[in-house]
Amino acid sequence: MKNLEVAIMAAVAGGKAIMEIYQDEFKIVQKEDFSPLTDADLAANTIIYEYLKETAIPIISEENKQLDFELRNSWEQCWIVDPLDGTKEFIKRNGEFTVNIALCRDGDPILGVIYVPVTKEIYYADVKKGEAYKTTLRGPLENTALYKEKDRIFPAETPAKTIRVVSSRSHMNEDTLTFIEGLKKSYDDVEIVSKGSSLKFCLVAEGKADVYPRFAPTMEWDTAAGHAICKAVGLEVIDQNTNRPMVYNRENLLNPYFLVR
């Protein structure tokens, strides 16, 4: 079975586990970095792991114990997983949380899946083929036709007068505001589009926004799947330290600031 299909199945199964907990009371604890952790994060992580381990490809997940770089550095490829991206949005019950699964090879994202459990929308991409899709599940995954031409997504054309900027619901800061002010010199109008979790990448990939500046901390599992989807449709995710595309499975899994364009 192809790795992308495995990732799709894993994401949907993880999303089902999340929704079972979302519709009930759930426990919230605080991790060492002060970010929230719920029962849903752990349940989805366990299920996703069971699917991905069959590929014999090593896994980096937010909810797994992180291995030393000396071990990871020898990996030619690896899965990068966030079993529940947007835990704060999950806790707020606003629906804007996702399951993120990416496959990276030599630091580059080559496959990506982002699943939205509340709406049952699944974004998936094969970078080598240059194809990305958004499919809404109308029933069980096995009864859903994937890779349909009508489901392909594409970014918007280069804006002329109005530019739409994606911002985080939870992480607007001075650096981002400064970037937005700079855009006003080149455009008649700057429209702010707010969204939680990795859905910010999806907005740009499907042409509902034009640029996504992220000048606040993220981790590799927050971005790898979205990066793959954006890359498949011809967008760049640029490391603001190097001015080159972001790479993954780095020694430090904390991302630099980046720009999707």
Image (cartoon, grey):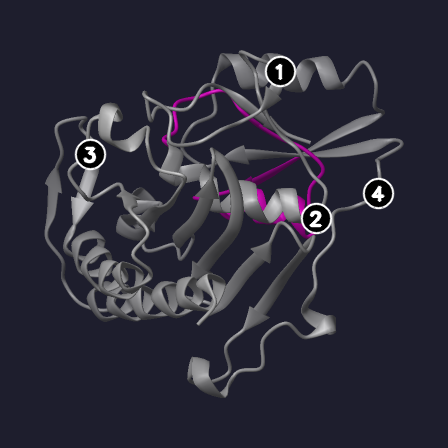
Q: Amino acid at mark 1?
A: Asn
Q: Nearer the viewer, mark 4 or mark 3?
A: 3
The mark found on residue 233 in the picture is 2
Find the distance from the CA under tag 1 to the CA under tag 4: 22 Å
Q: Is residue 199 left or right of residue 28?
A: right
> In whole angstroms, how far apart are the C-alphas of marks 2 and 1?
20 Å
Q: Residue at x 47, y 33 (%)?
A: 107
Does residue 251 appear in this view? Answer: yes
Q: Residue furthest bottom?
A: 143
Task: Please tell me whether mark 3 sits on a helix, a strand or a loop.
Answer: loop
Which residue matches tag 3? 66
Rate crowding at label 4 as few (under 14), some (14 to 19) or many (20 or more) other CA atoms within 10 Å. Answer: few
Judge by depth and name the residue closer to the eye, 24 or 254.
254
Looking at the picture, does residue 177 appear above or below residue 156?
above
Viewer-side residue, 57 vs 167: 57
Element class at badge 2:
loop
Q: Dot 1, how many residues are within 10 Å of its Cα: few (below 14), some (14-19), or many (20+)? A: few
Comes first in the chain, label 2 or label 1: 2
Residue 243, label in figure: 1
Q: CA distance from mark 2 to mark 3?
A: 31 Å
Q: Which residues are magenta?
A: 192-219
Percent position of residue 12, x then y? 38, 69
Task: Give the amino acid at mark 4.
Answer: Glu
Q: Is residue 142 above or below residue 44?
A: below
Task: Please report whichever mark, 3 or 1, sits nearer to the chain's N-terminal start.
Answer: 3
Q: Please, what is the three-letter code of the amino acid marked with disc 3?
A: Gln
Instruction: Quadrant for the C terminus, please.
Output: top right
Q: Of the numbered discs in the image, which one, if any, rests on residue 157?
A: 4
Q: Residue at x 81, y 13 (%)?
A: 185
